[in-house]
Image (cartoon, helix red, strand yellow):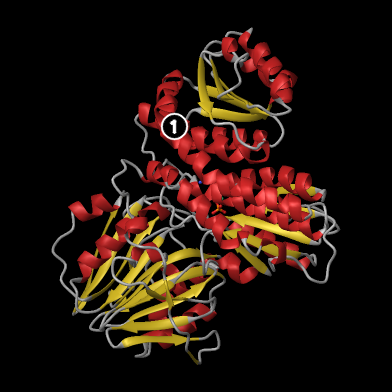
Amino acid sequence: MCGLIGYSGPRDVSGVLLESLRKLEYRGYDSAGVAVVNGALEVHKEKGEISVMESSMPPMQGHTGIGHTRWATCGAPSWKNAHPFLSQDRKIALVHNGIIENHNQIRKGLLENGTVFSSDTDTEVLVHLISHYHKGDLHAAVRRALDDVRGTYSIAVVEEYSDEVVVAKKENPLVLGLGLNENFVASDVTALLEYTSDVVYMEDGESAVISPRGISLYGADGSAADRPPSKVQWSMEEARKGGFEHYMLKEIFEQPRSISETIISYIDELEMLEILPTRKKVDMVKILACGTSYNAGMVGKYVIEELSGIPVQVEIASEYRYTTKTNRCPLVVLITQSGETADTLAACREAKDRGSFTLAITNVVGSSITREADAVLFTKAGPEISVAATKTYTAQLIAVYLLAARLGYMNRSMGDEEMRIFKASLRALPNKVSEILDRAQGLQAAAAMFRDATSAFFIGRNRNFPSMMEGALKLKEISYVHAEGYAAGELKHGPLALLDERTPLVAACLGDHTYDKMVSNVSEVAARGSPILLIANDDNEDCETLADQIVRIPPIEPLFSPVTLAVALQLLSYYVAKERGMPIDKPRNLAKSVTVE
Ligand code: AGP
């Protein structure tokens, strides 16, 4: 996954490119570069973060250009593999997100024609191919070159002595930004918000030519296309850090609002919400997702089964294709905050091939999954910049609660009275989350327990178990402490052998039907000398003696405890990572949306 930007207009282009690239840096940050049209083409790129590239950047004057920030997939992170790439005659420059699957084959043909390659990337073949087909019309050459390509891409291309940026898209996000006598393209709207809120989301197979005079959009068949722009609702402020030290902390603190907005969007019409198949009886649900979204799916299993009685299977999206084709289900739910995760998109296609109705839960309007799935339930978390998912996770939980209630009402497991009670509890949730945020200091104090830890275990039961898995995932992702989330009852079947006085245990001992069993499981660990951090409700007193540290969270209707628990664990992992001095928003080796399988 990478980020790209393109601009043509009266502004100093290098300023626009740098500013926009900074907003896209969460999409990849192992090299960055820009190409500026200043009569001839000028290119500057560096290995490392955008700040590295910026610090060595010579003055680059011009009004048309492209930029890129890379997350390596083909070819190691290095100067030579950084984008943009130039054609051999230096007349064309290109940036690319995605993968050219048949690059070896294309490379072979180009080598026979005498092309000299300067990188190990799949991308470079494309700029040479465009150059090969260029007979005076860059847009035509781009389209012709793409006919030869198998794979996925969003690209932006410029040529010398021209104020046009040619762009094209297939299975990688690309959005056009419309301004007054200036126009933009980017892989993400966050890069454009500084300049415009009028955007056009490009569709697969489309191409466009951007210049100060306007944007010409072309359909997959090459004919002129026209689509009115949509208004982005996200403000600049939403996309900025807003005074917090890290995006992650800001995003954790935004949760009362993101949860509330997701609830508000659907709650009034929940009984009749048109997200379910009309012609199929839903007697089973399958949820497919990756990482944090998978953990949200696991919570979904518990709550859908509880509210609707419909059995739910949750599978890792990348593994679904290996299951037998007879593994069919009337309703398949794909959860993906970015809407661009290649594994989840592939699982969506597979589910459709198997005849399932597909429902996507995503945070990004216009993302690929919204075009692939039969129906979409949008989370309203706003832009999430930090690589570690926080507010999108809790918004996904809200979405699965809404889905569970909708299914429960549909099959009459829930009547009007149950629905009324459910809605009232759901509406109370944002305030409960605010109460936990008010207690952030307690979690900051508890983080000291993990300062020197190399491994940690998180345990919970029933619907709290997946949020403990999520707590463990957050900890390993941003603090690099090895962590495992376990169903508490499973600990004694193996992992207990790993517990000693250097291995902290985090346990959710909340006031529900699992409380007594949780206390027993924690006692087993206490006997092994592991430091114990308990997450307990305000009124759970008898577990106190077992704990080295205890963090209190407000009691809540048990159905919704995965949400409050998740928020507490997000704060914990944030403060542990801070204590250990980690690059919280950009953990090593990870990227915000993973567009390769
Ligand atoms: C979350 O903190 C992780 N960065 C990661 O596990 C993520 O949830 C996963 O890659 C799936 O992403 P998606 O929700 O955009 O599909």
Q: Residues within 10 Å of mark 1 (few under 14, many from 20)?
A: many
Residue 587 visible from this viewpoint? yes
- The number of numbered discs placed on residues in the rendered structure image is 1
| Residue 306 occupies quadrant | top right
Residue 47 or 286: which is nearer the viewer?
286
**Is residue 302 found left or right of 90 in the rendered image?**
right
Q: Residue at x 40, y 63 (%)?
A: 234
Residue 113 visible from this viewpoint? no
Residue 140 or 184: which is nearer the viewer?
184
Q: Residue at x 61, y 48 (%)?
A: 426
Q: Residue at x 39, y 56 (%)?
A: 70
Figure check: 227 above or below 35 = below
Q: Residue furthest left?
A: 59
x and y percentages locating residue 453 in the rendered image: 47, 20
Q: Residue at x 56, y 65 (%)?
A: 101
**Is residue 6 found left or right of 132 in the rendered image?**
left
Q: Which residue is mark 1?
A: 479
x and y percentages locating residue 125 in the rendered image: 44, 69
Under mark 1, the amino acid is: Ser
SS of the residue under disc 1: helix
Figure check: 400 above or below 500 = below
x and y percentages locating residue 309 in the rendered image: 82, 48
